[in-house]
Image (spheres, helix red, strand yellow):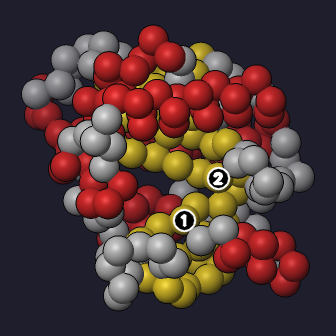
C-alpha cells in the first residue's frame, strides 16, 4: 500500500524527504482557499504533519500519500513527475476510524485526480481494516470537496458548527461510508 499507481497518479507514502514539495503545496494560499487559517507558514509545521503521516504508516499500515503525475497534464500545465497533491486514509491517534483526506494544488483541480486518489484510499482502507468506517470532515462551503465525497459513495451523517474555526459562521460536515451507531457518531463529532 505504500506505493500505488492509478491511471494518472503515482501514490507514494509521505516521507520526510518530501518536505520541500509538501511545504510548497501546504503554504500555497490557493490550496487553502476554503480554510485560510490552515495554511502552513513554516516548514516546521509541514515537517510535523509529515511525521504524523510516517507514524500512521508504521502503526496502521496505511496513511497519506504524496501524489505525483505519471504523465503530462497539458491542460493544467503540469509535467510528468510533478507533485500535485497529498491524501489518503489514516487512523488519527485516539480515534477508531479512517480519516479520509485529500488536498491538491489548484492547477490540478477539475481533472479527476482527486477522484483517483480518493478511490485508491477507500480501497486501501477497506483492504487494510475493513471493520473501520471511513470518515471525511468537510467545510460546507467547499462545494468541490463535498461533491468528491458524495461521488465517492460517502453519505452525509452530521452538519454543525466548525469548532475552533476563526470564521464563526463556518459549518462542518461529516461524511462516512456506512451507518454509524450513536456512540461512534458522538465520538466523531467530538473531534470536529
Q: Residue at x 54, y 87 (%)?
A: 160
Q: Is residue 75 left or right of residue 70?
A: left
Looking at the rendered structure, the secondary structure element under dot 1 is strand
Numbered circles on residues, count: 2
Image x and y of residue 150, in percent: 51, 67
Q: Residue 34, located in which quarter of the rendered image?
A: bottom left
Q: Nearer the viewer, residue 87 or 155?
A: 87
Name the residue that disc number 2 marks.
Answer: 99
At 26% from the left and 30% from the top, the residue drawn is: 24
Question: Is residue 66 shown to the viewer in this render?
Answer: yes
Is residue 172 in view?
Answer: no
The C terminus - image quarter: bottom right
Please report the residue visible at 17 percent of the width from the left and 25 percent of the height from the top.
Answer: 78
Above or below, 130 against 42 in this view is: below
Name which of mark 2 and mark 1 comes first in the sequence: 2
Residue matched to label 1: 137
* Quadrant position of the N terminus in the picture: top right
Amino acid at each position: 500500500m505504500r506505493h500505488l499507481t492509478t491511471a494518472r497518479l503515482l501514490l507514494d507514502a509521505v516521507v520526510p524527504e518530501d518536505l520541500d514539495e509538501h511545504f510548497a503545496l501546504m503554504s500555497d494560499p490557493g490550496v487553502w482557499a476554503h480554510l485560510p487559517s490552515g495554511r502552513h507558514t513554516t516548514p516546521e509545521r509541514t515537517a510535523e504533519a509529515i511525521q504524523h503521516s510516517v507514524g500512521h504508516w508504521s502503526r496502521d499500515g496505511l496513511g497519506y500519500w504524496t501524489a505525483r503525475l505519471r504523465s503530462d497534464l497539458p491542460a493544467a500545465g503540469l509535467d510528468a513527475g510533478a507533485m500535485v497533491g497529498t491524501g489518503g486514509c489514516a487512523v488519527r491517534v485516539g480515534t477508531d476510524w479512517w480519516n479520509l483526506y485529500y488536498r491538491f494544488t489548484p492547477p490540478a483541480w477539475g481533472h479527476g485526480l482527486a477522484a483517483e486518489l480518493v478511490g485508491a484510499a477507500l480501497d486501501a482502507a477497506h483492504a487494510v481494516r475493513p471493520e473501520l468506517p471511513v470518515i471525511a470532515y468537510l467545510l460546507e462551503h467547499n462545494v468541490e470537496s463535498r461533491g468528491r465525497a458524495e461521488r465517492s459513495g460517502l453519505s452525509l451523517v452530521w452538519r454543525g458548527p466548525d469548532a475552533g474555526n476563526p470564521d464563526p459562521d463556518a459549518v462542518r460536515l461529516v461524511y462516512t461510508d456506512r451507518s454509524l451507531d450513536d456512540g461512534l457518531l458522538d465520538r466523531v463529532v467530538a473531534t470536529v
